[in-house]
Image (cartoon, rainbow, N blue to C red):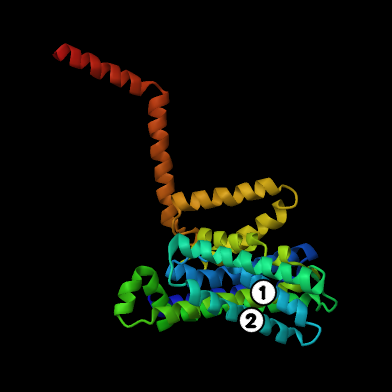
Amino acid sequence: MNDNQRLTRDLLVWFGLTGWALAIPYYGSEFVVSMALTCLMYVALSSSWGLFCGSTRYLSLATSAFFGVGAYTGALMLEQIGWIEAIALGALIATAVAVLMGSAVLHLRGTYFAVLTFGMTELIRHAITYFEKSVTGTVGRVLAVVPERDTIYLTVLVLAMGTVALSIGLRRTRFGLALAGIGADEQRAQTLGVNTRWVKIVGFGFTAAVAGAVGAAMSVRWTYIEPHTVFNPFIGFQTVLIALIGGATTLWGPLIAAIVFSVLAETLRLQAPQIYMMSLGLLLILSVLYLPGGLASVRFDTWKIWRDDIRAWWQVKRYEWSGDKARDKARARRAREVNW
């Protein structure tokens, strides 16, 4: 399959998923719409995270910081400006924070980068909490102006599928190739003329813009927000898990995993939260051990390989459990004794 065929396939899948998601509010119950909204939120977050972090192999834990900045911006400005303007402002401020943060830490890699991005997230959360308590005298915001359910849903849908569409396009541009080159060998990319610092900052800013816009759109879902809710580290960790389990380097992996996780979250989190967390851990372990490329790497040949491995394992175990292995060892030992 050449690149044009892949592009055609990706666009057809994108149009199909978009049409299916558009129809959900018209036939789905409140529970289904709520689950779809959560799914679209993580589609946007994990797809943007995968485009930058999956390509460059930079493990960012700052998603919840950008999400929270966008949510607070939307909550503060929604009464003064319009719905679209509040979302755009949330994305803009989150991008500005990402540019400042990226300029300070994007020269690091691996564990150092991950720890520093997480530390800066906590710094922002505690700074806003301190400001709320010391200056405003309260913690949190009550949202008096809340759009209709369908308006929120359509906005998050546009953000999610727009992020996927941008990912389809950017992966085929020089910018996408530069991100992949940084992930493969950053020093070699520099020798080939890639301005790696600029590319990393722009990619980091893109993930922040998406997270900030999604945070501003999702803030009205709670009607009351406070730092612990919107800067919750679990939002960032789950985004990373979704991208890794789905396949961070792939286009559709984060989307597939977001659907799986959303169904698990809505069906298990309230009734059996321990089982939900165990499911997350189990999926991560299985992906690392048997699907390093994520759920998107599963093909028909993969099932055949697993089937053959299971058959080989069963034959070995049946050989041991039947006693044939012990008898064969005893015969071989007696034969050696006779020869001696």
User: What mark, if any, has residue 94 been given in the picture?
Assistant: none
In this rendering, the answer to whether 15 lies above or below 123 is below
Q: Depth check: give the residue in front, 129 or 60.
A: 129
| 47 left or right of 159 in image | left
Q: Which of marks 1 and 2 is nearer the N terminus?
A: 1
Q: Pick whichever, 159 or 303, lies toward us.
A: 159
Task: Name the residue that disc number 1 marks.
Answer: 69
Of residues 188 and 43, the one nearer the viewer is 188
In percent of the image, x 30 and y 74: which residue is there? 188
Could you tell me which residue is drawn at 70 percent across and 79 percent down? Answer: 155
Residue 324 screen position, x and y as percent: 35, 22
Q: CB under 8 Å between callouts 1 and 2?
A: yes
How many numbered discs, if any? 2
Task: Tell me the distance, in whole angstroms, between the alpha carbons under discs 1 and 2.
Answer: 7 Å
Q: Disc 1 residue type?
A: Val
Q: Judge whether residue 154 can be spotted in this image.
A: no
Mark 2 lies on a secondary structure that is helix
For disc 2, the marked residue is: 93
Task: Decide: is 191 above or below 340.
Answer: below
Quarter where residue 171 is shown? bottom left
Q: Is residue 124 left or right of residue 4?
A: right
Q: Residue at x 48, y 71 (%)?
A: 105
Q: Quadrant of the C terminus?
A: top left
Q: Is residue 86 left or right of residue 141?
A: left
Q: Residue 34: which quarter of the image?
A: bottom right
340 relative to 126, above or below: above
In the rendered image, which quarter contains the N terminus?
bottom left
Residue 30, given in percent of the width and then of the height, sits at 79, 65
> What crowding class fits label 1: few (fewer than 14 Cα within 10 Å), some (14-19), or many (20 or more)?
many
**Residue 39 place in picture, x, y as percent:** 66, 66
